[in-house]
Image: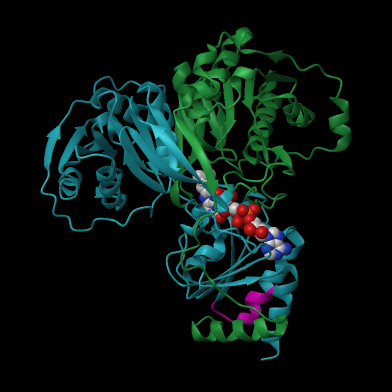
Amino acid sequence: MEILVCVKRVPDSAENEIEMNAEGNDIERDDLVFSVNEWDNYAVEEAIQIVDKVGGSVTVVTVGDDESDEVLRREMAMGAAKGILLNDDAFEGSDAKGVATILKGCVAKGNYDLVLTGAQADEGGAAVGGMLAAMLDYPYASLVNKVELGEGKLTVSREIEGGNQEMNSIDLPCVLSIQTGINEPRYVGIRGIRQVSGVEIPELSAADLGVDAATVGEAGVKAKKVDYFVPESGDGAEMLEGSDSEIIAKLIEILKANGGLQ
Amino acid sequence: MAQVFAYLVHNDGVLDDSAMELVVAAKAVGDDVTAIVTGSGIDAVADAAAQIFPKVIKVDDAALAYPNAEVVRKALVTIIPKGSVVLFANNTFAMDCAPGLSIKMDAAYVSDIIGLEADGTTLKTIRQEFGGEVNTHVDVDAADGAVVTLRPGTFAPDESKAAGGSVEAAAAGDMSAKRTFIEIVEPEAGDVDITKADLLVSIGRGIEEEDNIEIAHELAKAMGAGAEVSCSRPIVDAKWLEPSRQVGTSGCTVKPKVYMACGISGSFQHMGGIKGGFVIAINKNENAPIFQVANVGIVADILEFIPELTEALGDL
Ligand SMILES: Cc1cc2nc3c(=O)[nH]c(=O)nc-3n(C[C@H](O)[C@H](O)[C@H](O)COP(=O)(O)OP(=O)(O)OC[C@H]3O[C@@H](n4cnc5c(N)ncnc54)[C@H](O)[C@@H]3O)c2cc1C
């Protein structure tokens, strides 16, 4: 099975304290630490496990710039055979639809049976996979937390509300968005990354992909981010302050008052 | 503004409460507001929708008995005129259906919004980023239509049920699909039932390592018989605790007397599983979004604070 996994370089939420910039219209981006989107590691792991079972190969692709190279190599160190970087000035500022349009160009240049994305990335839009599938006229399932292989089709479980699983049969080729917890993504060490450091990563532009520059990048954006702001905290929590022992004494009173301690 | 449609979900013949919020959102967008319900044998659901919406379109077809996003999308593309604004409550169905619908309608798309106003053909929306640490204003050009998913709780629901709306039936059209629904598998029961606990010591990614989970168990033990350990999703994803201990939209819904969130940021999917009770948040980041919604907050490192609290309780 030939599998394409779409990945993204994102600010690492565990490593950054998000602060507003001096102008107060954007977050401070200078010192952000980046890594691969959490969901994408699960997607790549799932792809590798499928290929281990039935053969074929895994390709990872990202829409990004030179800095995305490290993300592709990290996923290649997990076991993806190939990486592709989709990079063009015209792609800058693309929204989900723009990214899906670019990825569609990449899918068309390959011969993939299965396309995987993470269920969502840093902006929480959860849109690229579903849009890409609709553009390709492939069937789609989101929030997939189990994949079983069949003849020309897959049985996939979608994680829906309340821990319930929605079982579906889906024809190949298809697009799946992968939910965290589907597997345990393998660890990648420095050594693994070093091993793939020499592998060439082809770079494709809008022209290579046959993508009309007017449909991507900022030109194609219909939902425009105007600015960032810190939400008003509403009533907010009553913050307990003082020394540790004072805080603990207050907390125990609160626990008792609310029936949390018998 | 163009026509506004709201897609309503229902379970076991009962209309989801989100309908009462969607009608408020739809009226914030435009005056010409219609609800759409799809399914098989859904007269009662359509009638319930007509108490909330002035107009209801009912698509009754055996192929829609289960809301398979692919077939529902086909029905919506058939029924909804291009250029319309379509609203969904943000849930796992919307995540499945709405992005593709926006492509098929050639409309703008914005998901999981927490604020919405119309200004000419622009939708002025608000979204969260970075787990709620910051918000963004997003202006959506809806001149050629828009597909919008709304986070539950954004608008106060209209519970009057006094719309006295009309119900009109529409044909679904071609219902062939490349994806077919098989069945729903319910979660297995775990060794503990956190939904019955009076007090939950709930841990999140701030617990950092599997070995540290022991400090949460010790605290729960020190708190007495009604206390249990629950957690956020990353703890279950890492297989450190069983799924039956997960609180949130894709886990359990709990209503303890006291919920102690330790090292949990306060994502809406997590908070969506807490239905009542007094919420105490302990987090080392003073800007953690959970402090916006908790009753009481403590800025502390849980790896130090939890053992101290356990010890203090032992001394009582
Ligand atoms: C469809 C879908 C369904 C989902 N369903 C659920 C669900 O049911 N339940 C759920 O929980 N999530 C769910 N999620 C995931 C959710 O979006 C969040 O990613 C998740 O809740 C974050 O968990 P967290 O707060 O533990 O981790 P994080 O967001 O990483 O927060 C960790 C917090 O710990 C603090 N911290 C770190 N170290 C310490 C320390 N030593 N002491 C004190 N504080 C510390 C940090 O400041 C931070 O605020 C779902 C996501 C999707 C897409």
Q: How many marks?
A: 0
Task: Answer above or below: position of A127 versus A159.
Answer: above
Compared across the picture, whether A86 is left or right of B186 comes to right
Residue B38 in the magenta stretch? The answer is no
Task: Answer above or below: position of A107 versus B74.
Answer: above
- The type of colouring in the image is by chain
Nearest the camera: A17 or A3? A17
Nearest the camera: A176 or B65? A176
Image location of residue B2, percent across then percent down:
25, 31
Furthest-front residue in this view: A23
Image location of residue B126, percent across then percent down:
44, 45
Q: Chain A is drawn in which colour?
A: green
Task: Answer above or below: position of A101 versus B6.
Answer: above
Q: Is residue A136 visible?
A: yes
- Name which residue lies at 88% across and 29% down: A194
Nearest the camera: A231 or B280? A231
Quadrant where the image shows the N terminus of chain B: top left
Image location of residue B229, percent across then percent down:
60, 68
Compared across the picture, whether A154 is left or right of B12 comes to right
Q: Quadrant of ligand 1?
A: bottom right
Q: Chain B is drawn in which colour?
A: cyan
Question: Residue B124 lies in what quarter of the image?
Answer: top left
Question: Residue B308 lies in what quarter of the image?
Answer: bottom right
Quadrant where the image shows the C terminus of chain B: bottom right
Q: Is residue A1 visible?
A: no
- Name which residue lies at 55% across and 82% down: A255
Magenta stretch prevailing secondary structure: helix
- Name which residue lies at 33% across and 28% down: B145
Compared across the picture, whether A9 is left or right of A222 comes to right
Image location of residue B13, percent across then percent down:
24, 47
Q: Where does the magenta region start and end?
A: B218-226
